[in-house]
Amino acid sequence: MRSLTVVLTTGAAAAAASAGFAFTIRPWWRTWGLDPEVSAAPLPGDDLVLDATTVDTRAIDIAAPPAAVWPWLVQMGDTRAGLYSYSVMGFPHGKGAKTIVPEWQHLAESDVLNEWVVREIEPERALVLASDRMGRWSWVFVLEPLDEGARTRLIERWKGKTTGGPRGMGVLLSAFDFGEFLMIRKQMLGIRDRAEHSTAVEPAGTGSTPTSGASTQAVRPKRLA
């Protein structure tokens, strides 16, 4: 009888922990920086994986205009500026560059960044990447201007659907989800810090070229300490 009580108590504790994880912890990391209701808003690239089993949307506010954030996004890639995140196995260039590199500022639809293909690009607004490695995935970066363009909200959305896989894949995916959250959170903080510290802006007409016709300022990179 005592062993039955132990089993029932342990089972109840495990069920409570599982419920707490499912309803509290996982929603927090999947919508980090956003209210859950806001995180469901449509974004560019949503149509790439309509039957996604994983949808994570996160955001961070940056005290810099979109024109100062965009150059850091467009130069990402393992063979380019890195990912501004952790350097771990599979992501050897995670930490990323600390300057804006002019030769990495050219990116167009169909360009390939490792296994990611550029599917849509709208300067200073949206970068949409897609991959078919181990399933179908989309990785979207959106810049929303705040305070009449003085600040920026960077939104990242990660959508995916795996195909096949061994038994127990669900447990592996849960671990992967949390690892992906840690990498992307670090990346977003890295982009924020670089954009906020890297820029001195020059008025239009001083010889610098804006990154798009809608912008009247250009970013002049400065190395981080």
Image (cartoon, rainbow, N blue to C red):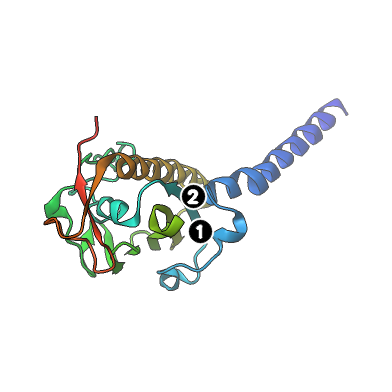
| Observer able to see residue 135 | no
Mark nearest the camera among 1 and 2 is 1
Q: Residue at x 43, y 43 (%)?
A: 185
Give the left or right position of residue 117, taking residue 1 as reference.
left
Q: Which residue is mark 2?
A: 173
Secondary element at tag 1: strand
> Residue 222: image x %, image y %?
20, 39
Q: Residue at x 11, y 57 (%)?
A: 207
Q: Which residue is mark 1?
A: 54
Give the left or right position of residue 103, taking residue 203 as reference.
left
For the residues bearing labels 1 and 2, Cβ distance under 8 angstroms = yes
Query: In front: 148, or 69?
Result: 148
Q: Amino acid at mark 1?
A: Thr
Q: Residues within 10 Å of mark 1 (few under 14, many from 20)?
A: some
Secondary element at tag 2: helix
Query: In front: 62, or 60?
Result: 62
Q: Residue at x 40, y 46 (%)?
A: 63
Q: Quadrant of residue 111?
A: bottom left
> Residue 106: image x %, image y %?
16, 61
**Could you tell me how many numbered marks the image carries?**
2
Q: Amino acid at mark 2?
A: Leu
| Observer able to see residue 22 | yes
Q: Residue at x 69, y 42 (%)?
A: 20
Does 212 sit above or below residue 100? below
Task: Name the residue furthest right.
Answer: 1
> Residue 84: image x %, image y %?
30, 42
Query: From mark 1 to mark 2, how far is it between C-alphas?
Result: 9 Å
> Residue 203: image x %, image y %?
22, 55
Position of the C terminus, as image quadrant, is: top left
- For marks 1 and 2, the one nearer the N-term is 1
